[in-house]
Amino acid sequence: MARPPYDDRMPRIAHWVWFPFGVTIRFIARNGKRIGISIAGFVLLIVGLAMLVLPGPGLLLIIAGFAILATEYVWAQRALNFAKQKAAQAKNKVLGKKQEAEPKASDPTNAEAP
């Protein structure tokens, strides 16, 4: 015996009215974590951008927002890695450290023959 396309306990018109809500509820249930992470990350990004012109730790909130978004999105992970590289370069520039472009003398591949 074939099963009807709607639940026998629910009238046919109620099924068509309820269907969009059921789909939405299933979507939220399946993707709730991603939706929550997206909302939290974007809120931190927006507040961080606002705090660039207002008093507060704007850069820290932007980095925190990218860190949260990087758990779900590759583009955010790339942006966070770029920010980390630029922060390391700025730190080295302030502290006066030079980047090591030359191989060290203790490197066996660079050793000269006696």
Image: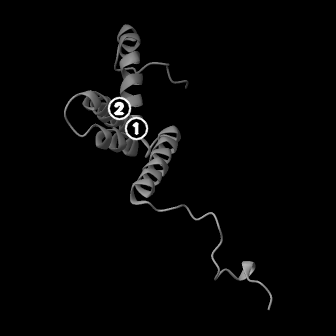
Q: Position of residue 101 (x, y in %)?
A: 63, 63
Kindly state the secondary structure of the residue where label 2 is placed.
helix
Closer to us: 37 or 21: 37
Amino acid, disc 1 = Arg
Q: Position of residue 77 (x, y in %)?
A: 48, 45
Closer to us: 28 or 11: 28
Q: Earlier in the sequence, mark 1 or mark 2?
A: 1
Please tell me which residue is depicted at 45% across the width and 54% down the height of the picture.
93
Q: Position of residue 68 (x, y in %)?
A: 37, 44
Q: Is residue 24 above or below residue 87?
A: above
Identify the disc placed on residue 34.
Answer: 1
Closer to us: 12 or 90: 90
The residue furthest right is 113
Q: Is residue 94 above or below residue 51?
A: below
The residue furthest top is 13
- The reply to whether the C-beta atoms of the residues labelled 1 and 2 are less than 8 Å apart is no
Say which residue label 2 marks.
42
**Residue 29 is drawn in which quadrant?**
top left
Q: Position of residue 69 (x, y in %)?
A: 41, 40
Identify the disc placed on residue 50.
Answer: none
Q: Is residue 70 above or below residue 12?
A: below
Quadrant of the drawing holding the N terminus: top right
Quadrant of the drawing holding the C terminus: bottom right
Please tell me which residue is depicted at 29% across the width and 40% down the height of the picture.
61
Q: Is residue 29 above or below residue 101?
A: above
Please tell me which residue is depicted at 58% across the width and 65% down the height of the picture.
100
**Residue 65 is drawn in which quadrant?**
top left
The answer for how far apart the CA atoms under marks 1 and 2 are is 12 Å
Kindly state the secondary structure of the residue where label 1 is placed.
helix
- The local crowd at label 2, few if under 14, some if 14 to 19, many if 20 or more residues have their Cα within 10 Å, is some
Amino acid, disc 2 = Phe
Please tell me which residue is depicted at 45% across the width and 42% down the height of the picture.
72
